[in-house]
Image (tube, helix red, strand yellow):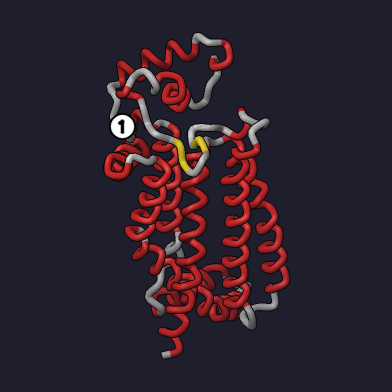
Amino acid sequence: MISFFANLFGYILNFLYQSIHSYGLAIILFSIVLKIVMLPISIKQQKTMKKSAKIQQKVREIQDKYKNNPEKLSQETMDLYKRENMSPLSGCLSAIIQIILLLSVFFLVKSPLTYMSKVEPAIVEQYTNEIKQQEEHKNDPYPEITIIKEKGKTDEKVNINMEFLGLDLSSVPSQNFSDWRVYIIPILYVLTSFVSMQITTGIKKKKEEGISNEIDAVAQANKTMSYIMPVMSVSIAIIAPLGLALYWLINNILMIIERLILNRFLKDEEEA
């Protein structure tokens, strides 16, 4: 399934690349297109979060009332969700889609010759074998990126213009510690991840205010996550090609804009 979507996204990214001949700009436009396509799901997810927050007080009242009767508790809870026309698992589908999307784009950017340029597998395999015979590339996690860098100058079939604003999007920060430029996109990615997390936890806090006495525990969990996510972001951004970090950076920026607009729009809709 992941390969299917990576291959599908590859057609879109390749179309954009062939139109503008810039891998960096193609990734930016691809991120925008993908975000627009996913907008209906994002709106539904945001509405679900708001609706879920509203019925949590009723759920807790049921839990207090029938805490000694598990069977009745389960039945009353299910009846509540039915009356509210909401499934307890309504957020799962959105989460699954996001995971599939994340992995698909990772595969796409990790192996652009296979999924984007549609280079014949025999050619990719031949160059991969040649690359891995070199001691420094024996355990290369991104052989197709290396092929583009080393073979792209002499073979047009595996050539992709990865120069973007003075940066080489095929570079991997962990393999280029001496070049300060490789840290620009990962640092921006980490900063936007932190901002995105703060916005998300901030929205959740507002929804949870007045709903439960457990808000302090939730707030503490949100605070912990706001520190963990940037650390995870640093780890991922350092070991991934800059092309992948660029996609995540643009996706973070678009996500921040989307959350702010949707939250405001849904708030106005709710007040109306």
Q: Residues within 10 Å of mark 1 (few under 14, many from 20)?
A: many
Front residue (pair 212, 151):
151
Front residue (pair 125, 204):
125
In this rendering, the answer to whether 132 lies above or below 15 is: above
Res 75 visible = no
* Residue hosting label 1: 117
Q: Give the amino acid type for the residue marked by disc 1 in the picture.
A: Ser
Residue 196 lies, in percent from the top left, at 57, 61
Determine which quarter of the picture holds residue 20: top left
> Mark 1: which secondary structure?
loop
Residue, x 49% and y 44% (percent of image)? 165
Residue 197 lies, in percent from the top left, at 60, 61
Residue, x 30% and y 16% (percent of image)? 122
Number of marks in the image?
Answer: 1
Front residue (pair 96, 140):
140
Front residue (pair 84, 74):
84
In this rendering, the answer to whether 218 lies above or below 118 is: below
Q: Is residue 64 left or right of residue 7?
A: right
Residue 222 lies, in percent from the top left, at 66, 63
Residue, x 52% and y 68% (percent of image)? 71
Q: Is residue 4 left or right of residue 100?
A: left
